[in-house]
Image (cartoon, helix red, strand yellow):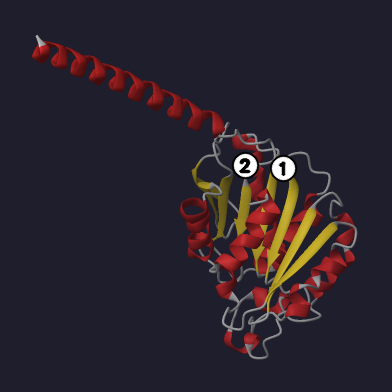
Amino acid sequence: MSTFTNKHTLVWSGLILATLFIIFTIFKSSNVQSSEKALTAVEKYPTVFVHGYKGTYNSFRTMLDRFEHHHGWGKKTLEIYVSENGSVSYKGTIPKNPSSPPLVQVIFEDNRAALDKQAIWLENALKLMHHSFQVDNINLVGHSMGGLASTKYLENARGKDFLPATHKFITIATPFEGVTKDSYDQINTGAAVIDLKPQSRALKHLYLNRHMIDPGIKILSIAGSGDDVVNVPSALGSEKLFDRNEFSSQIVYDPTISHSGLHETTKVDRLLGDFLWGK
């Protein structure tokens, strides 16, 4: 009799423990789901990354990989390729209801083209986003000449309702006062090299047309103390162009981080994450 009672008690104890475990598991699962906040409307804005002179798909590839897999700040969903004749093709999509901020790469086939051309090509890419994926708002991030092309695009885009509005714009090591490395135009070729010279016609026009930039765009410009291609005053010369905008700047003080290294460091990642999403 005693043995039967003990066995009976053990069975009931096991059932009770199993039931409690199931209840705990369901509660924990539902609690995790409820703690996951839906994206705000602003967090759903795609952030578009534009490479610089001689840049390629690889220019922002590792940064976007860190954003997605290391920081958990977004997901790369779209790549847009612009040919040298301005036609666009793409790989991927923009989700209608993304679960994380969409990240987009724009890649120019001719990565040594003049500033005017690159601005038109960027417009073609963003026109695609607006028409094919109904994108009404974006953020822009440009490294080096990509920041100049994006600025020129912003001057051209004012009042065009077939383009998405730009919410925030980040420039990284962008030569607003020209490339300051003495030998740059001797070892590089292409129409872009002329535009990148200090006091070039393209840079002067960029400054003269600054009134065309939407004053509602929020601007962050990043410079690097170790950048031997674009010095700090040139990279922060953007303040003169965006004199009507909410403007901020940051200098990455690290002599070991080169011009191209600025999109390869978590120090810059953190600046972008904080400015774009408060991460």
In percent of the image, x 55 and y 47: which residue is there? Answer: 74
Q: Is residue 264 above or below residue 42?
A: below
**x and y percentages locating residue 36 in the rendered image:** 55, 34
What is the distance, in whole Å, between disc 2 and disc 1 at their CAs?
Answer: 8 Å
Report if residue 6 is visible in the image: yes
**x and y percentages locating residue 247 in the rendered image:** 82, 60
Which dot marks residue 184?
none
CA neighbours of label 1 inside 10 A, class few (<14), some (14 to 19), many (20+): many
| Front in this rendered view, residue 54 or 82 | 54
> With 217 as the anchor, is 97 left or right in this view?
left
| Front in this rendered view, residue 187 or 139 | 139
Looking at the image, do the residues carrying marks 2 and 1 touch, with CB atoms under 8 Å apart? yes
Q: Secondary structure at mark 1?
A: loop
| Front in this rendered view, residue 15 or 214 | 15
> With 242 as the anchor, is 10 left or right in this view?
left
In terms of image quadrants, where is residue 218? bottom right
Circle 1 sits on which residue? 164
Q: Secondary structure at mark 2?
A: helix
Residue kind at label 2, given as amino acid type:
Met
In terms of image quadrants, where is residue 160? top right
Q: Earlier in the sequence, mark 2 or mark 1?
A: 2
Which dot marks residue 129?
2
**x and y percentages locating residue 202 in the rendered image:** 78, 71
In percent of the image, x 70 and y 64: which residue is there? Answer: 171
Q: Is residue 255 above or below residue 262?
A: below
> With 124 as the anchor, is 166 left or right in this view?
right
